Amino acid sequence: MTEVRIDKWLWATRIFKTRTIATDACKLGRVTMNGMNVKPSRLIKAGDVISVKKPPVTYTFEVLNVLQNRVGAKLVPNYLRNITTRDQLELLEMVKIDGFVNRQKGQGRPTKKEGREMKEFTDDAFFGFDDDFDWDDDTNPLWTAEDEANLNNEKAK
C-alpha cells in the first residue's frame, strides 16, 4: 500500500480521536497539504507534509509511512515526524499557562489548591470556635448574671 486516505491516516496515527472528527476537520478546512485545504478522501503518500489546525496551534507533520489501521501510541513515530515550528509550540505553552493562571473563579470544579483554601477558611481552628461548646447548656460561660438582669430589665419596660 503506497497511498491512503488522509482522514484514515490522521485517525490511525492518533492525531484525531475518531475518524469522524478527522473527516470533519478536513471538511472545515483545518487540514491542509502544501497550503491547500484537502478533502477527507485525498490520498497521501510518504513524504507529504500535512498541517493540522487545532486552535490555537497549527501542527505540521511529515508522513514517513502510510497505514490504514490504528496503531499503538508507541508505534506512531514510525509513521510521522512532528515538524511543528518552535513558535507554535511556545504559543501552546503560553495558552496552557494562561488558561491555568487566569481561570475564572466559579467555573467548573475547584482545583486542589482552591479546595485546600476553602477547607482552611471553614476550619474551626480558623474561627477559634470550640466544637465541644453546648449551645443548649443553661450554664453558658458567655452569658453572665449581669446579662440576665439586663434582659429582665428590658422585658419589664
Image: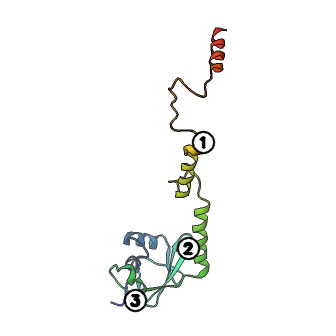
Q: In the rendered view, tell whether residue 16 sits above or below residue 137.
A: below
Image coordinates for residue 28, horizontal then vertical, percent:
48, 70
Image coordinates for residue 16, horizontal then vertical, percent:
42, 73
**Mark 1 is on which residue type?**
Phe
Image coordinates for residue 143, horizontal then vertical, percent:
61, 25
Q: Residues within 10 Å of mark 2 (few under 14, many from 20)?
A: some
Q: Residue at x 34, y 78 (%)?
A: 70
Report the Cα–Cα distance between label 1 and label 2.
Answer: 48 Å
Q: Residue at x 52, y 81 (%)?
A: 60
**Mark 3 is on which residue type?**
Asn
Cβ–Cβ under 8 Å for marks 3 and 1:
no
User: Of the residues under marks 2 and 3, which one precedes in the sequence?
Assistant: 2
**Mark 2 is on which residue type?**
Val
Dot 1 corresponds to which residue?
Answer: 127
Image coordinates for residue 49, horizontal then vertical, percent:
49, 86
User: Of the residues under marks 3 and 1, which one precedes in the sequence?
Assistant: 3
Report the Cα–Cα distance between label 3 and label 1.
Answer: 65 Å
Q: Which mark is residue 65?
A: 3
Quarter of the image for the N terminus: give it: bottom left
Q: Which mark is nearer the camera, 3 or 1? A: 1
Q: Residue at x 54, y 76 (%)?
A: 58
Q: Residues within 10 Å of mark 3 (few under 14, many from 20)?
A: many
Report the Cα–Cα distance between label 2 and label 3.
Answer: 24 Å
Cβ–Cβ under 8 Å for marks 2 and 3:
no
Residue positioned most to the top: 156
Q: Helix or strand or loop: what does disc 3 sit on?
A: loop
User: Of the residues under marks 1 and 2, which one precedes in the sequence?
Assistant: 2
Q: In the rendered view, tell whether residue 92 sits above or below residue 141.
A: below
Q: Residues within 10 Å of mark 1 (few under 14, many from 20)?
A: few
